[in-house]
Amino acid sequence: MAPKKINNSPFRYPGGKFYARKLILESIPKHEKYCEVFAGGASIFFAKSSVSQNVLNDLDFELVNCYRIIKDNVEDLIYLLNGIPATKELHSYYKNEYQPTNNLERAFRYYYLNRTSYSGIMKTANCYFGYGDKYSMRPENWPNHLRTCSEKLSNAKLECLDFEELLYDLEEDFFLFIDPPYFNADQDKFYNCMFSKEDHYRLARTLKKLNNKFKFLITYDDCDEIREIYSWCNDILNKEWNYTIARTDDQKRNLKLSDGHIGKREKGKEIFITNYLQTEVEGLKQEKYYSDNMNQPLLTF
Ligand SMILES: C[S@@+](CC[C@H](N)C(=O)[O-])C[C@H]1O[C@@H](n2cnc3c(N)ncnc32)[C@H](O)[C@@H]1O
């Protein structure tokens, strides 16, 4: 079987699943309806083949508005971005002074700040300039990438709901990819929407109630509380993957790894929780994926 091309999200996203994409894709059973409940950068949706129904949901209105504009109005967004360089001064201007007057301008501001901020962090208090010519996508490449994303989004439904409302609204037989904020991490630093401990328990209760309606894969940080509240699921698997973090100071010091990359090697570690057995996905494991930049360092500076 010919390898499938993996596409990239339009966004840089904290907690994004960029480096775990292959592992996740290989753990998903065959499905005709696909939903990302906590979409964020939706790196799995962009990496996988589309199916007959595709739903992306996130509670962050600014993010979903930007997806909607990329989907329905991409040329107007590209027109606004045309010729605007990635600079610290403009980042500060769009973050602190610019007042968007409509949803297109809001999407323009969101996209510009996301592409030029450290790790794509959009939470206002932690949204700092972090663009570097060597490791960030250059502004001249934004338009074509946006057009590719727009095409991919053309058959996706975009929702901006709390996960519980979404899960009750969805018809049955969707495959759900569920990537909530970590249980033990200071997520308030990264995301505009708060996710409390009670929200984690509410998610587990909702999924248990709807267990027969959907198949799902949840990714989480490994801890006793999460293992306990999902003990009714079929599989809880330990997963690990490698990635490289490049930072501006590594770039300045020209700190090179043996493979020629500038940056620091890290290990991603999570648990994958499923309400189906891995034997159901055996067939799909034969599928191979490739990407133009699968081995590039994570863009975090
Ligand atoms: C870990 S991120 C998802 C990352 C994503 N899988 C990726 O690859 O980029 C978690 C997301 O959950 C969203 N979120 C927080 N609370 C939510 C809620 N109650 N319902 C739906 N989404 C929520 C946040 O806005 C954030 O985008």
Image (cartoon, rainbow, N blue to C red):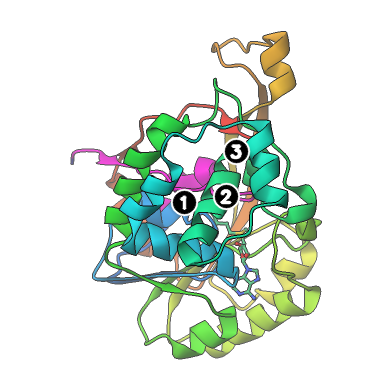
Ligand 1 under 8 Å from disc 2 Cβ: yes
Q: Which residue is mark 2?
A: 16
Among all residues in the image, which is located at the extreme left?
A: 1
For badge 3, the amino acid type reads Thr
Q: Which residue is mark 1?
A: 43
The magenta span reads 2-25
Ligand 1 location (quadrant): bottom right
**Magenta stretch holds residue 5:** yes
Ligand 1 under 8 Å from disc 1 Cβ: yes
Left or right relative to 97: residue 101: left
Q: Nearer the viewer, residue 239 or 122?
A: 122
Sequence-wise, which precedes: disc 3 or disc 1?
Answer: 1
Quarter placement of the C terminus: top right
For badge 2, the amino acid type reads Gly
Sequence-wise, which precedes: disc 2 or disc 3?
Answer: 2
Q: Position of residue 49 (x, y in %)?
A: 28, 55
Residue at image coords 66%, 25%: 265
Q: Position of residue 29 (x, y in %)?
A: 36, 63
Report, in whole angstroms, how far the alpha carbon at label 1 lies from the one at label 2: 7 Å
Q: Which type of secondary structure does the marked residue at label 3 adopt?
A: helix
221 in relation to 82, above or below: below
Instruction: Please say if the residues under marks 1 and 2 sit with CB atoms less than 8 Å apart.
Output: yes
Sequence-wise, which precedes: disc 1 or disc 2?
Answer: 2
250 in relation to 180, above or below: above
